[in-house]
Amino acid sequence: MNIIRMSGGLGNQMFHYALYLKLRSMGKEVKFDDINNYRGEKARPIVLAIFGIDYPRATWDEITAFTDQSMEWKKRIRRHIFGRKAVEYEEKGFYDPQVLSFEHMYLKGTFRSEKYFEDIKDEVRSTFKFPELAEMHLPEKLHLSTKRSLERIESTEAVALHMYRGDSRNNEELYDGICTEQYYEGAVRFIQEKYPDAVFFIFSNEPKWVKGWVISLMKSQIKEGMTKEDIKNLERRFVLMEANSQHTGYLDMFLMSKCKHNIISNSSFSWWAAWINDNPKRLICAPGKWVNGEECEDIYIKGMVLVNEKGKVERTVK
């Protein structure tokens, strides 16, 4: 049996479950440790249930058998004398094919690569299909606001633009200087060249900061000779979305996936919103690197347009 240690928010949870589906398709027994990273008041919610998912959970005894985490004093003394008996794998990089060969392992990581489940993509896509809005049973006010947003998205050449700033501030060495303002501006220009009528729906965990960026971007696009009506039309092409809470954040992914195109940040949440977008003509703009100091090629999927931190389009992933 293998145990996958679940961690992070919805995006990471989806990568974990996609790996589970792959291992299961290979005839392996797999369970989840949803205990260690989800204890305490500040723990993020597990929200895979929005997809109707009920996964197999490992017991604490099963987890400690793999990780040697028991705090019983006799076992701690034995550990001190004879050494640890842990059977653990900790992820290195984005994709490691040996992960698929394990039969008895405790798996720690995010496993952020389509390569893990490329041959079962149809199953993964059908698993991560959001229910219809009416079937989500939301509170009336939240249902109406989400419905209005969805109607506007479906009636325009909608582009989901995701500006997530959490990781870049919590771990500057890994994430700083990647999803810069110039990156987003370059991605916006690229899509505007392809789709002049594009409307950008901007999702962010920091709407106040984003509002200032949007105003600056719009000012940079005002040209000499524009009428007041032209400027109003320009303003209508940038829509700042109201942020949802951690417990209803899946609605952001739902709406982002309904847009025709995606400009993503270097986050798992953003990646999945673009991946489950079923528009066959979608454009996906992604940052030219995902983290600093690591080879990132395995995170990208075919057709992604990579834009660097200076706003320059580098290449399209083949």
Image: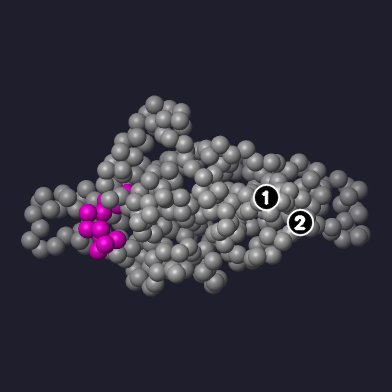
Q: Secondary structure at mark 2?
A: loop
Please state the horizontal and vertical placement of residue 83, each as a whole percent of the image. 87, 61
Identified at 52% across, 63% down, the residue is 299
Segment tinted magenta in the rendering: 191-206
The mark tally for this picture is 2
| Whether residue 153 is situated above or below residue 291 in the rendered picture | above
| Residue ID for mark 1 | 24
Bin the neighbour count of mark 1 within 10 Å (Cα to Cα): few under 14, some 14-19, many 20 and up.
few
Bin the neighbour count of mark 2 within 10 Å (Cα to Cα): few under 14, some 14-19, many 20 and up.
some
Q: CA distance from mark 1 to mark 2?
A: 11 Å
| Residue ID for mark 2 | 103
Q: Secondary structure at mark 1?
A: helix
In the rendered structure, which amino acid carries the disc numbered 1?
Arg
Q: Is residue 224 left or right of residue 286?
A: left
- Sequence-wise, which precedes: disc 1 or disc 2? 1
Please state the horizontal and vertical placement of residue 282, each as a whole percent of the image. 36, 56
Q: Is residue 230 left or right of residue 142?
A: left
Identified at 88% across, 47% down, the residue is 73
The one of 194 and 228 positioned closer to us in this rendering: 194
Q: Is residue 102 left or right of residue 48?
A: right
Quarter of the image that includes the C terminus:
bottom left
| Whether residue 224 is situated above or below residue 49 in the rendered picture | below
Residue 48: image tag = none
The one of 57 and 70 positioned closer to us in this rendering: 57
Queried whether the magenta region covers residue 163, the answer comes back as no
In the rendered structure, which amino acid carries the disc numbered 2?
Glu
Identified at 82% across, 47% down, the residue is 71
Please state the horizontal and vertical placement of residue 93, each as a whole percent of the image. 60, 66
Identified at 60% across, 43% down, the residue is 43
Contact? badges 1 and 2 (CB < 8 Å)? no
